[in-house]
């Protein structure tokens, strides 16, 4: 756990990184896929902890950090619609799918504690990873139990955050115990974070508001019929609450490995992580640089949370010519939000009522994969497998009305809430698929590979009863919407290896994203005709993406420099977007809205300039624009797809040096640049926000000996105030910020 890159200075060449991006162990430099790998040594030397620390430094990747349960990953500019639909990026923890479907749509942000590596695959991965890997896959691969060596690793860090009066800390521990030498081992991992908040809630005084006049509108009676004072929204005194966005995380993992025979191995993993944010995550520029105005705190504090539970059993049996793997996994993700939506009341009624939106959405997924693949050095290599998925997601939503809790049951539908949607399943999804790949190495330097996945998917969603002011009192349950689709995701590549240090590949691959369901549609007459014209129905078909990529992977200077490049074109067909019918048909839903054409280029360079000095550099550009659009979606042909940066870049420099025969040291600096992003809200009354580009620098200085390391670090050295995600200006104009400067110390100790 204390092994820095400096420990590998016995040789000048860069160490080889082995990945399983193609579901077989291969050198990163030989894989005919655009994939970036972050090793355990990189994680430690750069002080990486979560998605926000590293994803924006991977070429072509954009991380939209909007808080627990909501944050999204964009690869090559392929952006998912917010909310109900599945994402365009699949995430994994080892063999386990973690991109669980929930209403809030976020990716579980697993902390990088005792992690062997992170693999980021760019481009559609439909053949090997199936649905929802439309634009790529992010895999966090945990360290496996060691069958031979007993070990204990502990670490702690403490740090101060600019613009905060709180301190932060992290503790972690890893215990590895061989129970039967070379046969059975247990690995236990635990960690805890308390991260300081830095946003203040600054709320001015507000007097009570008489909104009795609204009852006349609801009842259809002349204005002034309802006596003044019938409905009064309470005010609040001025108050300030400091550092409200503090975050607490805990996690644990137990992994048991049993090598029953030399050929047969069982790996069981149980993991859990809980993240609690003690407020809403955003800042409101009108309130100050690091401030918000959440008057609802006078009644109820905000909260964002996510909890992830994982169970995985992998069984592997090896013959001399083939290997059989069974991977069974269960994942559950629970998300919750408590957010201030008083602006909705202000927009609808002209009165800023204290409304709180409480959303709980749980998703769970069971998967079973069985695959058989070749082993050895034969020119023919093959893989064949079966995959099954059963996924369920439920939803509970309640808009609590704090404006007049005593009088509302009397005068408004007998209810003390503005909206209530009881917990119920909103989506059930089942998939069955058959997949395989075959490759042949010919003429010593050429390899031709092809594969495909045939998938059957069924989705259904009921429409439960809803009640409250926002649905006119009560809306009964309606029929379940059902749909099915059949997809074939082929891929092919040609790899040329003129020397052992150069790989050139040409690849074509297809990915797809699962379909979704719409709310019940009760269109008749002209509205029904308009809905049919844009394809607005009960079930939305999957969207698909074809990518055509030319890449090179080169080692030069005796293996001390690696240069990887990729250029690509992609065609995204049947893009899922929200559509609205105009006029008297003012209802909306999701449709397959059109097509998008994209292109881009990526570059990664890693080098050991001397035995003591190493560097890395990456950059990427991607551009996606609408090639065709249907009416009702608010976009035009030639318009840039919003929601992701088109450029990013990163650079790092590390110098390792000896102090004496026992101690060594290192210094490291990292810089990441994220290009500007374009957001478009309310397409038919457009509000466009051009989010500014930003760059951030981190530094780290440490000393270590065999079993002890002490490091000083500073993240966001310049204390850059940067916006990483932007909300609709008409819904508060919220901004989600890069964390301010953090300075601290980390201590690690290992016993083996």
Image (cartoon, helix red, strand yellow):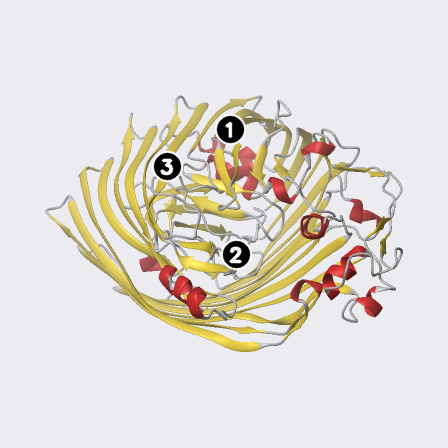
Q: Residue furthest left?
A: 443
Q: Residue furthest front?
A: 222
Nearest to viewer (mark 2 / mark 1): 1
Q: Nearer the viewer, residue 677 or 468?
A: 468
Q: Position of residue 727 (x, y in %)?
A: 59, 42
- Residue visible at 48% across and 31% down in the picture: 676
Q: Kindly identify which numbered label has been placed on residue 682.
A: none
Q: Do the residues under discs 2 and 1 have CB atoms within 8 angstroms?
A: no
Give the mark, 3 or 1, whose residue is nearer the N terminus.
Answer: 3
User: In what element is the residue under mark 1?
Assistant: loop
Number of numbered callouts drawn? 3
In the picture provided, is 728 more to the left or to the right than 372?
Answer: right
User: In what element is the residue under mark 2?
Assistant: loop
Q: Do the residues under discs 3 and 1 have CB atoms within 8 angstroms?
A: no
Camera sees residue 90: no
Give the mark, 2 or 3, whose residue is nearer the N terminus.
Answer: 2
- Residue where numbered disc 1 is placed: 693
Residue 387, quarter of picture: bottom left
Q: Between marks 2 and 3, how big is the CA–CA gap?
A: 40 Å
In the picture provided, is 180 more to the left or to the right than 542?
Answer: right
Q: Kindly identify which numbered label has been placed on residue 622.
A: 3
Location of the N terminus by quadrant is: top right
Q: Between marks 3 and 1, how big is the CA–CA gap?
A: 15 Å
- Residue where numbered disc 2 is placed: 145
Q: Nearer the viewer, residue 35 or 324?
A: 35
Q: Between marks 2 and 1, how big is the CA–CA gap?
A: 42 Å
Give the mark, 2 or 1, whose residue is nearer the N terminus.
Answer: 2
Q: Position of residue 30 (x, y in %)?
A: 28, 43
Check disc 2: other Cα within 10 Å, few if <14, some if 14-19, many if 20+.
many
Q: Do the residues under discs 2 and 3 have CB atoms within 8 angstroms?
A: no
Q: Nearer the viewer, residue 200 or 130?
A: 200
- Residue visible at 39% across and 49% down in the picture: 136
């Amino acid at each position: 756990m204390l092994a820095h890159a400096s420990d590998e200075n016995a040789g000048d060449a860069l160490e080889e990184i082995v990945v399983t991006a193609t579901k077989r162990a291969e050198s990163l430099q030989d894989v005919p896929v655009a994939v970036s790998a972050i090793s355990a040594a990189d994680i430690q030397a750069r002080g990486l902890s979560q998605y926000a620390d590293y994803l924006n430094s991977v070429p072509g990747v954009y991380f939209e950090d909007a808080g627990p349960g909501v944050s999204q990953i964009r690869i090559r500019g392929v952006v998912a619609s917010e909310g109900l639909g599945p994402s365009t990026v699949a995430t994994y923890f080892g063999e386990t799918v973690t991109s669980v479907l929930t209403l809030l749509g976020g990716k579980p942000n697993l902390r990088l504690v005792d992690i062997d590596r992170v693999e980021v695959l760019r481009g559609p991965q439909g053949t090997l990873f199936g649905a929802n890997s439309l634009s790529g896959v992010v895999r966090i691969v945990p360290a496996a139990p060691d069958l031979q060596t007993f070990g204990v690793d502990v670490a702690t860090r403490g740090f101060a955050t600019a613009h905060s009066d709180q301190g932060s800390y992290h503790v972690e521990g890893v215990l590895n115990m061989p129970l039967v030498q070379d046969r059975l081992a247990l690995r236990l991992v635990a960690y805890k974070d308390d991260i300081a908040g830095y946003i203040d809630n600054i709320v001015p005084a507000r007097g009570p508001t008489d909104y009795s006049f609204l009852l006349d509108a609801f009842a259809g009676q002349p204005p002034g019929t309802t006596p003044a004072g019938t409905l009064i929204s309470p005010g609040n005194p001025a108050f300030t609450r400091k550092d409200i966005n503090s975050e607490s995380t805990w996690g644990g993992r137990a992994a048991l490995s049993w090598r029953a025979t030399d050929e047969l191995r069982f790996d069981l993993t149980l993991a859990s992580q809980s993240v609690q944010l003690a407020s809403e995550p955003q800042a409101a520029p009108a309130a100050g640089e690091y401030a918000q105005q959440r008057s609802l705190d006078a009644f109820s504090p905000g909260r964002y949370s996510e909890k992830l539970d994982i169970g995985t059993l992998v069984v592997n049996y090896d013959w001399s010519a083939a290997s059989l793997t069974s991977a069974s996994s269960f994942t559950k993700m629970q998300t919750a939000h408590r957010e201030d939506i008083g602006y909705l009341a202000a927009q609808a009624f002209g009165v800023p009522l204290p409304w709180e939106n409480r959303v709980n959405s749980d998703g769970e997924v069971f998967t079973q994969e069985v695959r058989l693949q070749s082993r050895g050095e034969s020119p023919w290599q093959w893989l064949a497998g079966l995959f099954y998925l059963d996924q369920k997601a439920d939803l509970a939503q309640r808009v609590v009305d704090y404006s007049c809790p005593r009088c509302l049951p009397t005068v408004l539908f007998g209810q003390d809430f503005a909206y209530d949607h009881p917990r119920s399943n909103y989506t059930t999804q089942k998939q069955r698929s058959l997949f395989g790949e075959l490759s042949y190495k010919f003429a010593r330097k050429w390899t031709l590979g092809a594969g495909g996945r045939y998938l059957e998917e069924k989705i259904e969603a009921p429409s439960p009863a809803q009640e409250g002011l926002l649905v006119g009192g009560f809306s009964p349950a309606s029929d379940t919407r059902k749909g099915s689709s059949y997809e074939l995701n082929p891929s092919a590549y040609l790899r040329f290896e003129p020397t052992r240090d150069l790989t050139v590949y040409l690849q074509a691959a297809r990915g797809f994203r699962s379909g979704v369901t719409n709310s019940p549609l009760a269109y008749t007459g002209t509205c029904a005709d308009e809905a049919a014209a844009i394809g607005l129905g009960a079930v939305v078909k999957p969207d698909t993406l074809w990518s055509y990529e030319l890449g090179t992977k080169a080692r030069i200077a005796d293996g001390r420099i690696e240069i990887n490049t990729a250029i690509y074109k992609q065609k995204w067909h049947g893009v899922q977007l929200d559509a609205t019918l105009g006029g008297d048909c003012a209802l909306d839903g999701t449709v397959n809205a059109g097509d998008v054409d994209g292109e881009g280029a990526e570059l990664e360079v890693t080098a050991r300039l001397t035995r003591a000095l190493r560097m890395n550099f990456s950059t990427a550009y991607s551009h996606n624009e609408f090639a065709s659009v249907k009416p009702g979606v608010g976009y035009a042909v030639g318009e840039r797809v919003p929601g992701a940066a088109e450029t990013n870049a990163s650079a790092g420099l590390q110098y390792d040096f000896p102090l004496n025969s026992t101690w060594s040291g290192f210094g490291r600096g990292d810089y990441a640049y994220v290009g500007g992003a374009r957001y478009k809200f309310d397409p038919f009354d457009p509000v466009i926000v051009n989010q500014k580009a930003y760059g951030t620098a981190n530094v780290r200085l440490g000393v270590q000996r065999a079993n002890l390391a002490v490091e000083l670090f500073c993240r966001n050295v310049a204390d850059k105030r940067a916006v990483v995600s932007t909300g609709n200006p008409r819904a508060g104009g919220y901004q989600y910020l890069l964390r301010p400067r953090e300075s601290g110390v980390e201590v690690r100790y290992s016993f083996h």
